[in-house]
Image (spheres, grey):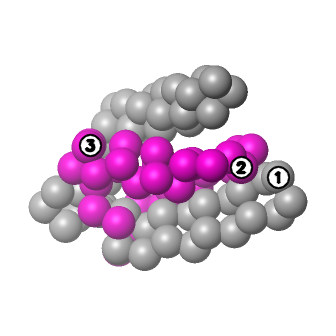
């Protein structure tokens, strides 16, 4: 059983790296991923577990992870703009 994290955003160089680095930095194990790009839009779906190999159950933990992913997307977009 996995927690599903779906990221739907504009594509840019380094996006996948930023997302996976953010997940790893937060002790999230990626069991599987489906990476899809539609023109300039991406829908990346990650099937993840916590550091103990369990599904995430804490709503606050998920909210924190969401905030960190949003921050990583924003920082990367600013970096890509130059």
Q: CA distance from mark 1 to mark 3?
A: 27 Å
Q: Which residue is mark 3?
A: 26
Q: Position of residue 47 (x, y in %)?
A: 44, 68
Most foreground residue, 12 or 8 = 12
Q: Position of residue 32 (x, y in %)?
A: 43, 75
23 in the magenta segment: yes
The boundaries of the magenta stretch are 1-30
How many numbered marks are there?
3
Q: Position of residue 54 (x, y in %)?
A: 22, 64
Tell whether 15 sits left or right of 24.
right
Of the residues tagged 2 and 3, which is closer to the observer? 2
Mark 2 vs mark 3: which is more N-terminal?
2
Q: Residue at x 39, y 38 (%)?
A: 65
Quadrant of the rendered image containing residue 79 = top right
Mark 2 vs mark 1: which is more N-terminal?
2
Q: Which residue is mark 1?
A: 40
């Amino acid at each position: 059983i996995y927690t599903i994290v779906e990221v739907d955003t504009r594509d840019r160089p380094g996006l996948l790296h930023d997302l996976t680095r953010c997940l790893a930095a937060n002790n999230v194990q990626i069991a599987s991923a489906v990476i899809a790009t539609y023109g300039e839009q991406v829908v990346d779906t990650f099937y993840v577990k916590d550091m103990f190999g369990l599904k995430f159950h804490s709503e606050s933990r998920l909210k924190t992870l969401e905030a960190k992913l949003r921050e990583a997307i924003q920082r990367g977009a600013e970096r890509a703009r130059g």
